[in-house]
Amino acid sequence: LAKTTQPISMDSYEGQEVNITCSHNNIATNDYITWYQQFPSQGPRFIIQGYKTKVTNEVASLFIPADRKSSTLSLPRVSLSDTAVYYCLVGDWGAGNMLTFGGGTRLMVKP
Amino acid sequence: NAGVTQTPKFQVLKTGQSMTLQCAQDMNHEYMSWYRQDPGMGLRLIHYSVGAGITDQGEVPNGYNVSRSTTEDFPLRLLSAAPSQTSVYFCASSSQGLDEQYFGPGTRLTVT
């Protein structure tokens, strides 16, 4: 299983761009990088997934360097409602391989 | 679509009691999984299934049993509840070949 390391917590202000970096030094060739968001008392919600380079959707961007040993989730212009825990997962769940959630990054957005 | 549903929402058990947490999905997903989340912690995988009749252990399977007789349902059984099993339990489902998991609302279990 690929182990991931993320900052425990981050603070930001409304309107700022937030970048959360995840380290995954032992990522395997078939592994994808997936990010989830979790609000208190709710199950996690899928945000974005990528394999290499850059992926962008309506809520976030994911930057993956060529060596794939890290990835950065970028949230543009955060609002108070983006206060949540963000999890980086590395693996190939789609192929039935077990993957794990780490401790996540607790993002606090302040007014 | 109701998505992923879990029952009950809350449960209090005494040590040694057994119970089954129910999970159902109506998206025809092949993969289903159970996680537990302790206060202030990330999710840990208990058991998962890649299709009806197929189950496998996750990180923390001890004290739990699962079976998958249909595509829709994936119940989690606590054989003899212990205070260490006090946690929030999440069920999730996903399509084969895709990594996006859809999570249920969770069951908050307290074992006294």
Image: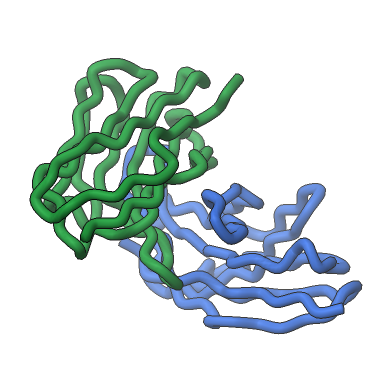
Q: Residue at x 47, y 33 (%)?
A: B94
Chain letter for the green colouring in the rendering = B
Residue projecting furthest to the right: A15
Q: Which sits in the foreground, B34 or A55?
A: B34
Residue B83 x, y percent position in the rendering = 19, 63
Chain letter for the blue colouring in the rendering = A
Residue A110 x, y percent position in the rendering = 81, 79
Locate the N terminus of chain A by quadrant. bottom left
As displayed, is residue A95 above or below residue B63?
above
Q: Residue at x 53, y 57 (%)?
A: A33
Q: Which sits in the foreground, B46 or B14?
A: B14
- Classify residue A6 as left or right of residue A72: left
State the image quarter where residue A111 is shown. bottom right
Residue A85 x, y percent position in the rendering = 59, 67
Q: Residue at x 87, y 74 (%)?
A: A14
Q: Which sits in the foreground, B25 or A69?
A: B25
Q: Residue at x 44, y 53 (%)?
A: A31
- Classify residue A106 as left or right of residue A98: right
